[in-house]
Amino acid sequence: MNNDRINGIFNKYQGQAGSLIRVMMEIQEEEHWLSREILVKISEKLEVPLSRVLRIATYYKSFSVTPKGRHEIQICTGTACHIRGAQSVLDTVQDLIGIKPGETDLDQKFSLETVNCQGSCTCGPMIKIDQVTQSRLSSAQIADLLKKYD
Amino acid sequence: MTRINSAAELEELRQGILSKKDPDKPSIAICAGLSCLGLGNGTIISAFKEEINKQSLESKIDIVTTGCHGFCEKGPIVVINPEEICYLEVKPEDVPEIISQTVIEKKVIDRLVYTDPNSGEKATHMAEIPFYKNQMRVLLGNNSKINPKCIDDYLMIGGYSALAKALFEMSPVQVLEEVKIANLRGRGGGGFPAGRKWETTRNAPNEEKYVIVNAHEGEPGAYMDRALFQANPHSVLEGLIIGAYAIGSHQGFIYTRHDTPELRKNLDIALAQAEEYGLLGENILGSGFNFKVEVHFDVGIFVSGESSALMRSIEGKAPEPKPKYIRTSVNGIWDRPSNLNNVETWANVPQIISKGSEWYNSIGTDRSKGTKLISLSGHVCNSTIVEVPMGTSLKEIVYDFGGGIPNGKRLKAIHLGGPMGGTIPESLIDNPLDFDVLAKLGASMGAGDILVMDEGTCLVELARYFIDFLSGESCGKCVPCREGIRQMQNILTNMTKGKGREGDIELMEELAEVMGAAALCSLGRSVQNPLLSMLRYFRDEFEAHVKEKRCPAHSCKEAAIEGV
């Protein structure tokens, strides 16, 4: 855990209950997930009941309460990607790495999730790996692409 | 940066910026919109920087990373100014040639310019490309000219003069009246008159009032707001400040998505720069008007674009809608009057104030005024963002701007307004882009996203897709929405698998009726819209799935296997 960065976030928003979602978002961006320990700390620092912190953490899809893999794969399943074959891209990725959306593999190499429209419909079907967009993918290209990551 | 204390100082600053600018200095505008970014413009930007560095031309050539130019299909797009030479589908290996040939020698590189797919005619300048030429780019036109990270660029093109006009030449009521006469209607989906909404909040009995930019844009296939906001954040901000002045609000909120880093960066910079110039904060431009803005983020759920849910989220709570016995414009964030408009609506405000409601009323149809941003996606040659006057025919949008249907296929239908919109068949695409005309056809305009579908698309499958999407997005608070969606999802999934039963269609219609009447918020009440519009125009396709276990579009494979 990068304590300096996390403490920086806490110092900025200390006692501001209204900034709960923003604080959780900033910490998740640093840590890629929200541990129980962190959630308790958020509750204390922002003076928000832990029950509300937990509720927000489990309500939004972008928050993860389990650790993520080293590489995060996001597959866009927006309408345009869908009718351009996002499902077959998703099936191929699932076959290759052996996990379903929302899961992380045992080696903690990949995490997989589906995301809503990313606003670059001309790139569809598209996936993002570690925030880098891969455009107009065919199922055949995916195996080569995933080999680049370790 | 020094604070600007009056309208005269603002003009002085503008003239100063203009006089310092050398109009002949070459500048390379590289589109950094979301699509161009996805198509690899990052490497193009570094290639340009590297090449300019290598030739030690830093002081002679400017590089500007701009927001979306709109012609996303042909990205990455590079525009060489001041000549406005437009290069499409640029690759890193083209960069040295662009610098030496075009920027220095002023020669056009033929292979990189636009070629008309039908006539083979070339177009060198941005304004000559039919895609741009035939649009009316009131809101998007400046995207390729300004650096979104630099407020001076916005000032250079006349930015914040509408704000100065509103603050010093008009009373809040006059501003409100102007927007009302302009007949500006909300661009987020409802098409509700913005002026009337403002008036409700202005007259609501509470001193503390809020104004909010809805930049949530959760509809799949809608990406015009992100493009506009990222490319020209100040145009939205200026509209918001003018609106706050008219309404009597001193606190604004921007609610946007967390997953668009480039937009977040531009927005943070825009707010900081506006504050430094005294265009935000205390005593704006020395007028005595105070206004601040906070940014809040959606972290990934569709329902938080709904007004009452969005406001709960700004309060730091879970974004669940609440019953609107009293409208949010009267009882919103922390039970105070809160006026919510979407990005495009706010961006229209400075235009109306500077050019007047008469000008605005001269564009569009009888009851839908101004221009509209449209994002095209799906089975269309150009997945792009276009800005056209209201009243433009849907056919023109799909064929002239979208370039028609790829792979020689036939158009089957278009879908407007995402998972809460509606589908209309090919036979009706001569209809104009107009809030009321589209509503009568059973397809709301939504945010302006048009999904184009060719003959190979199965509408039962699409209905299933939308319901499937919404099943994950419903907040679950009210039973009609939560359970209704689940039942519809089961029925539609069965249909696509060839397991539909007699009476399924009627059962879904009944469910739709109950949800439309009983769900808590507009999400639950509009879930059935796509389905109902599809049943209206393509009922036979649903019947074929149920009665004959057959998919007429040959798309549902499991249905076809058992089929005739």
Image (cartoon, coloured by chain):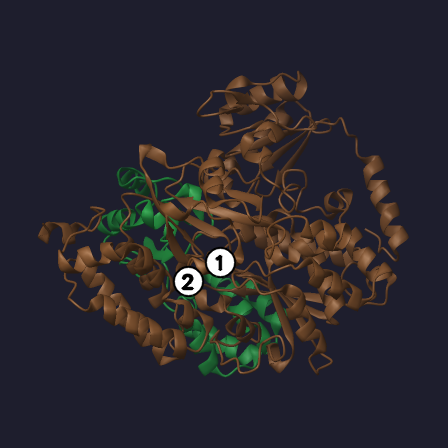
Please, what secondary structure does the residue beneath circle 1 have? loop
The answer to whether residue A15 of the structure is visible from this angle is no
User: Circle 2 is placed at which residue position?
Assistant: B420
Q: Same chain for marks 2 and 1?
A: yes
Q: Nearer the viewer, residue B236 or B65?
A: B236
The answer to whether residue B523 of the structure is visible from this angle is yes
**Apparent colour of chain B:** brown
Find the distance from the CA under tag 2 to the CA under tag 1: 8 Å
Is there a contact, CB below 8 Å, between mark 2 and mark 1?
yes
Picture quadrant of residue B77: top right
In percent of width and height, residue A114 lies at 35, 56
Please, what secondary structure does the residue beneath circle 2 have? helix
Q: Which chain is green?
A: A
Q: Amino acid at mark 1?
A: Gly
User: Circle 1 is placed at which residue position?
Assistant: B446
Picture quadrant of residue B295: bottom right
Q: Chain of mark 2?
A: B
Q: Is residue B82 above or below residue B426?
A: above
Q: Is residue B472 left or right of residue B374?
A: left
Q: Is residue B240 left or right of residue B228?
A: right
Residue at screen point 23% across, 55% down: B540
Q: Amino acid at mark 2?
A: Met
